[in-house]
């Protein structure tokens, strides 16, 4: 039933904040052959509820099935698909970049352009923190690459819907 | 215990062990009946059979570790067939969990994908509420098995029992009432259809909607087919009955799906054994799909009008809407359609010198007047039971449909017999499957449960052999069962009665004799070894491409 091309969907899943719930979600994806591109989990303002932001790819019928299957899990309170609504999306990355003296100005300029910041400066490396949507983070990494990136720690996407106008 | 009794539990199928010894100690002080099975898989299948025959929830109690892992096949079968079963497993004491303790296993982790939900109880104060929730989840919505893992220290400690009155889960709210906008749309296309077919599944039986389904079909003069799980949802005696659909469905049922212009699918999930190749299934039809589980809808087959709701409530509303409509003379209008399929060939076999398995099932049907509760093992026996025992009422056919779990029939028959002590319960078995849980003969004799086991003994794993004959050049790799036990002696060894028929003229007399005995009986019918189940649709082919003989 591939009735549409596969595209990326950001799902926000509100779940009971209990042990084993993440495993139920992850198990559902692996057991049914769905795909997880990234996953972020944290408690919400209600300590009994956690928000899982999950990025997956699939055509419409697959994503519809994913959402139904998630809703079927007893511990899932709500599933929101951000695909067709206005939303804000952010990812964050910590980038450890080689800071040769001749590159330092260039790094700082790039950091400035991207409104990111240096969170640790050593004699050989800087650690830079960047937030933004996927495209911005990717562009930033692209510019730092020639300087020599030694390590990256990157979150998946998190997202919230915008206020309705 | 009190929590269990409040849920109306009067029977538990189980097997004791170290981690549940305290529970057994308490159990002995109640009037709950405990049926001691001989293997934990048998306990779950028995609870499954009990639940399906009684319409209630089946309950099992087993110990930790191997006791728990042995239940997994039973749980998976109940999950696939949406049977409400609550499984209580013992667990090592909380402080030992994760330490690879003796008889420790992460059963909550193992059964996560094959239960509707499961729990590890961490505090005795949570116990009553968890039990209440578990029963509520097991029996509501689309039913299914729920497992509760009970660490030894939790059940050793005591608490003041506070009855839990109300269960409301904010994240679990099955939709029983159909969306009001969908039904008028359904009515419209039902009126327009020239060649409608009603296609029902296990959901109709689970929601006790057989009466409403029958009313619908008669009201709109539509022929009816069901899945394996739906047998009994519509009376096989009715002139509108097409027979079962699917891989071993009748010619007319399968062809009707190809020809119809409207398919009213009720409580089905469009399993691959039903649809065959999905993109050629019901190509000319608009589809109305009624099911309580939204995931069943549009999972495999696109539908025109999806209706999420309980089958019984939805059909009742649909029927009442249809009653208000001027339908014209549907009987006349749909006559050509009804006569079209009636002319087609029904199921057939020829009884020669060797006993045909179909003949045994047919005679069993005649002798029991269709009133027995039938359980089956899995394979050819299951299909012949489905084809030649004609079910007129729901909850009379109990089989492992989704999982296809060999060894299901005997323990399920035991469970059904416990639920209905005065009914005739017959397990239609093969010589392969019956050996997978044969130890439950001891359970049957211990509790004097007079289940009847009809073995269609072809000395093969017949269904696999059939595939090998048809698709693997008759290379019967590892499907011969030459060293089967003597089932007559085996029955006697268990304290039951064993009978055997080797010639066609003995079939009726052996059946008569066996069915009359008020004890567990094994009837061993030595049948045509290389008989095949027909019609057959090769896996993955369109369901209209049937091998007929």
Image: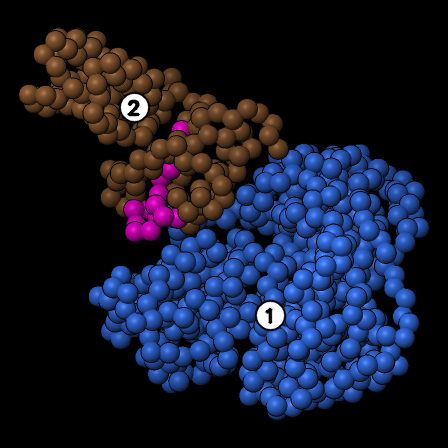
Chain colours: A brown, B blue
Magenta part of the chain? A10-24
Residue furthest left as drawn: A123
Question: Residue at the location (54% across, 61% down)?
Answer: B78
Vertical arrangement, residue B18 with respect to residue B381, above or below: below
Q: Residue at x 12, y 14 (%)?
A: A100
**Residue B83 relative to residue B101: left or right:** right
Residue located 34% across and 45% down the image: A22
Which of B213/B546 is in front?
A: B546
Q: Reply above or below: A48 against B150.
A: above
Would you say the residues marked 2 and 1 are in contact, meaning their CB atoms lie under 8 Å apart? Answer: no
- Calculate the distance from the C-alpha at mark 2 to the C-alpha at mark 1: 53 Å
Q: Which numbered disc covers residue B407? A: 1
Residue B100 seen anywhere in this rendered image of the structure: yes
Picture disc at residue B266: none
Q: Give the secondary structure at mark 2.
A: strand
User: Mark 2 — residue?
Assistant: A90
Can you give x and y, in whole percent of width and height, for residue B382 in the image?
A: 70, 65
The image shows residue B375 at horizontal and vertical percentages of 66, 70
Protein chain holding label 1: B
Residue that appears at 71% across and 62% down: B476
Q: Estimate how packed mark 1 is, as few (under 14), some (14 to 19) or many (20 or more) residues with alpha carbons within 10 Å.
A: many
- Chain bearing tag 2 is A
């Amino acid at each position: 039933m591939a009735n549409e091309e596969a595209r990326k969907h950001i799902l926000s899943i509100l779940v009971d904040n209990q042990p084993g719930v993440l495993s139920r979600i992850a198990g559902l994806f692996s057991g049914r052959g769905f795909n997880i591109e990234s996953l972020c989990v944290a408690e919400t303002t209600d300590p009994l509820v956690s928000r899982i932001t999950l990025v997956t790819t699939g055509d419409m019928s697959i994503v519809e099935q994913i959402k139904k299957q998630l809703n079927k899990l007893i511990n899932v309170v709500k599933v929101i698909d951000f695909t067709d609504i206005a939303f804000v999306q952010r990812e964050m990355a910590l980038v450890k970049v080689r800071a040769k003296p001749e590159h330092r100005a260039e790094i700082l300029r790039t950091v400035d352009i991207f409104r990111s910041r240096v969170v640790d400066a050593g004699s050989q490396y800087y650690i830079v923190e960047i937030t933004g949507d996927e495209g911005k983070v990717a562009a930033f990494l692209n510019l730092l690459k020639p300087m020599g990136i030694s390590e990256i720690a990157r979150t998946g996407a998190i997202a919230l819907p915008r206020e309705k106008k | 215990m009190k929590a269990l009794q409040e849920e109306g539990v009067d029977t538990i199928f189980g097997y004791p062990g170290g981690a549940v010894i305290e529970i057994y100690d308490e159990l002995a002080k109640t009037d709950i009946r405990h049926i001691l099975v001989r293997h934990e898989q048998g306990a779950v299948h028995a609870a499954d059979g009990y639940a399906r025959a009684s319409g209630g929830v089946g309950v099992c109690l087993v110990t930790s570790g191997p006791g728990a892992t042995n239940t997994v096949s039973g749980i998976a079968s109940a999950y696939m067939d949406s049977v409400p079963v609550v499984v209580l497993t013992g667990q090592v004491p909380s402080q030992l969990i994760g330490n690879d303790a003796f008889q420790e296993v992460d059963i909550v982790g193992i059964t996560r994908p094959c239960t509707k939900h499961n729990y590890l109880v961490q505090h005795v104060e949570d116990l009553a509420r968890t039990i209440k929730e578990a029963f509520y989840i097991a029996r509501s919505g689309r039913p299914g098995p729920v497992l509760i893992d009970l660490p030894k220290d939790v059940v050793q400690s005591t608490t003041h029992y506070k009855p839990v009155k109300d269960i409301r889960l904010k994240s679990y709210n099955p939709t029983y009432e159909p969306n009001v906008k969908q039904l008028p749309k359904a009515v419209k296309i039902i009126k327009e259809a020239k060649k409608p077919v009603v296609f029902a599944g296990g959901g109709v039986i689970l929601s006790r909607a057989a009466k409403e389904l029958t009313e619908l079909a008669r009201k709109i003069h539509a022929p009816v087919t069901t899945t394996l799980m739906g047998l009994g949802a519509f009376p096989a005696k009715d002139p509108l009955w097409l027979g079962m659909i699917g891989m071993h469905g009748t010619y007319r049922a399968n062809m009707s799906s190809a020809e119809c212009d409207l398919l009213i699918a009720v409580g089905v999930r469009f399993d691959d054994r039903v649809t065959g190749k999905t993109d050629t299934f019901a190509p000319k039809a608009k589809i109305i799909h009624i099911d309580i589980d939204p995931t069943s809808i549009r999972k495999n087959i696109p539908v025109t009008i999806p209706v999420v709701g309980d089958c019984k409530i939805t059909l009742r509303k649909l029927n009442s809407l249809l009653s208000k409509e001027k339908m014209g003379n549907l009987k006349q209008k749909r006559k050509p359609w009804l006569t079209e399929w009636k002319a087609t060939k029904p199921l057939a076999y020829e009884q020669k010198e060797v006993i045909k398995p179909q003949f045994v099932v047919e005679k069993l049907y005649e002798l029991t007047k269709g009133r027995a509760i039938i359980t089956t093992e899995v394979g050819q026996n299951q299909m012949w039971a489905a084809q030649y025992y004609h079910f007129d009422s729901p909850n009379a056919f109990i089989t492992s449909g989704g999982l296809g779990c060999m060894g299901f029939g005997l323990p399920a028959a035991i469970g059904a017999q416990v639920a209905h002590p005065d009914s005739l319960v017959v397990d239609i078995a093969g010589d392969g499957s019956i050996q997978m849980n044969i130890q439950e003969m001891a359970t049957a004799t211990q509790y004097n449960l007079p289940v009847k086991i009809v073995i269609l003994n072809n000395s093969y794993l017949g269904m696999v052999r059939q595939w090998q004959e048809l698709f693997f050049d008759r290379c019967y790799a590892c499907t011969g069962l030459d060293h089967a036990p003597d089932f007559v002696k085996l029955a006697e060894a268990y304290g039951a009665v064993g009978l055997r028929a080797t010639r066609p003229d003995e079939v009726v007399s052996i059946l008569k004799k066996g069915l009359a005995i008020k004890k567990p009986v094994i009837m061993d019918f030595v049948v045509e070894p290389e008989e095949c189940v027909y019609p057959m649709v090769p896996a993955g082919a369109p369901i209209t491409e049937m091998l007929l003989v």
